[in-house]
């Protein structure tokens, strides 16, 4: 009888991060948009406030990350569920920092940018790399998810800062971040530009794009939105995201 060899810890960890394809970015933008409408649904529509909503979403985030790190192989539903947990938590934490703490969009964005930079610095010092194809241990996985959380939170603050400053608006804000993503994609054609830097730049920029799109969908008409209910919008986005996860081709970073 043939006995299959068990996967090494490195192989198992690598298989838990999806390959970066066009489908990855489509699902990521849907997840960030869902994070905005879902986070606002709890904090604003249900009127739980930013602090209470952040506590609830942090509990969900902690449970999702624990399950993701404990998993021995890649599970697309678990992975993307954890991504959604970071976007909803990022939404309420950013709003809490910007509004409840009274430091404004500029102060909140600066604070979150510093935390994101610190996360990258500590991650690199601890493991030697912040490249996603080098996530070969649970320590690296934890840094990966903490960094993602900070990037999602920063992205929310940046989206609100651009859209709400000088009445720039959500639609034009979405166009700005779309243009920035297109510029990052163009840089990919230059071989000498570090791919890791391009990945994280794109990853961070998808969040304010999702934030402005989410606000465009659910904000009142007199605030520049389409006034679609947050729960209805969240359900529609979740359904579309699920369809993409099931239908779009997806590979894993490790060879199987």
Image (cartoon, helix red, strand yellow):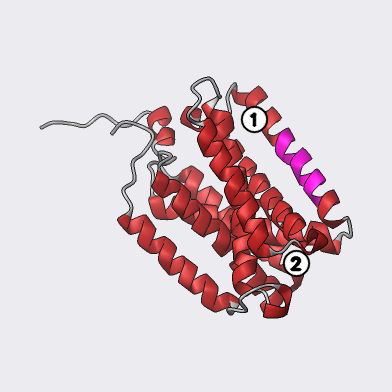
The residue depicted at 42 percent of the width and 68 percent of the height is 239
Residue 215: % across, % down: 65, 67
Q: Is residue 164 above or below residue 19?
A: below
| The quadrant where residue 94 appears | bottom right
- On the picture, is 3 further left or further right than 26? left
Q: Are marks 2 and 1 in contact (CB under 8 Å)?
A: no
Q: Is residue 77 visible?
A: yes
Q: Earlier in the sequence, mark 2 or mark 1?
A: 2
Magenta stretch contains residue 22? no
SS assignment at label 2: helix
SS assignment at label 1: helix
Foreground pick, 209 / 113: 209
Q: Is residue 227 above or below residue 27?
A: below
As measured in the structure, the alpha-carbon distance from the residue carrying label 2 to the one carrying label 1 is 29 Å
| The quadrant where residue 89 appears | bottom right
Residue extending furthest right? 102
The residue depicted at 59 percent of the width and 24 percent of the height is 127
Residue 175: % across, % down: 61, 55
- On the picture, is 1 further left or further right than 218? left
* Main SS of residues in magenta: helix
Q: Which mark is residue 50?
A: 2
The residue depicted at 67 percent of the width and 32 percent of the height is 120
| The quadrant where residue 1 appears | top left
Foreground pick, 73 / 70: 73
Pointer 1 residue? 123
- On the picture, is 122 further left or further right than 253? right
The residue depicted at 51 percent of the width and 25 percent of the height is 190
Q: Is residue 27 above or below residue 116?
A: below
Extent of the magenta region: 107-117
How many other residues sit within 10 Å of disc 2, few (<14), some (14-19) or many (≥20)? many
């Amino acid at each position: 009888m043939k006995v299959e060899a068990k996967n090494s810890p490195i192989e198992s960890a690598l298989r838990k991060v999806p390959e970066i394809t066009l489908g990855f970015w489509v699902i990521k933008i849907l997840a960030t948009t869902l994070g905005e409408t879902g986070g606002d649904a709890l904090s604003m529509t249900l009127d739980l406030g930013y602090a209470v909503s952040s506590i609830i979403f942090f509990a969900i985030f902690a449970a999702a990350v624990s399950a993701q790190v404990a998993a021995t192989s890649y599970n697309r539903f678990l992975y993307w569920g954890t991504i959604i947990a970071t976007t909803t938590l990022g939404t309420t934490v950013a709003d809490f920092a910007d509004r409840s703490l009274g430091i404004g969009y500029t102060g909140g964005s600066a604070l979150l940018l510093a935390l994101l930079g610190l996360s990258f610095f500590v991650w690199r010092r601890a493991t030697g790399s912040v490249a996603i194809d080098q996530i070969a241990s649970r320590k690296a996985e934890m840094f990966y998810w903490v960094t993602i959380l900070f990037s999602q939170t920063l992205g929310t603050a940046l989206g609100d800062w651009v859209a709400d400053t000088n009445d720039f608006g959500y639609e034009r804000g979405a166009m700005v971040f779309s243009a920035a993503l297109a510029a990052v994609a163009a840089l990919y054609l230059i071989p000498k530009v570090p791919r890791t830097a391009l990945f994280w730049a794109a990853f961070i920029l998808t969040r304010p794009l999702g934030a402005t799109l989410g606000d465009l969908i659910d904000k009142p008409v007199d605030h520049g939105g389409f006034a679609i209910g947050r729960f209805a919008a969240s359900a529609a986005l979740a359904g579309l995201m699920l369809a993409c996860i099931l239908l779009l081709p997806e590979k894993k970073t490790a060879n199987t």
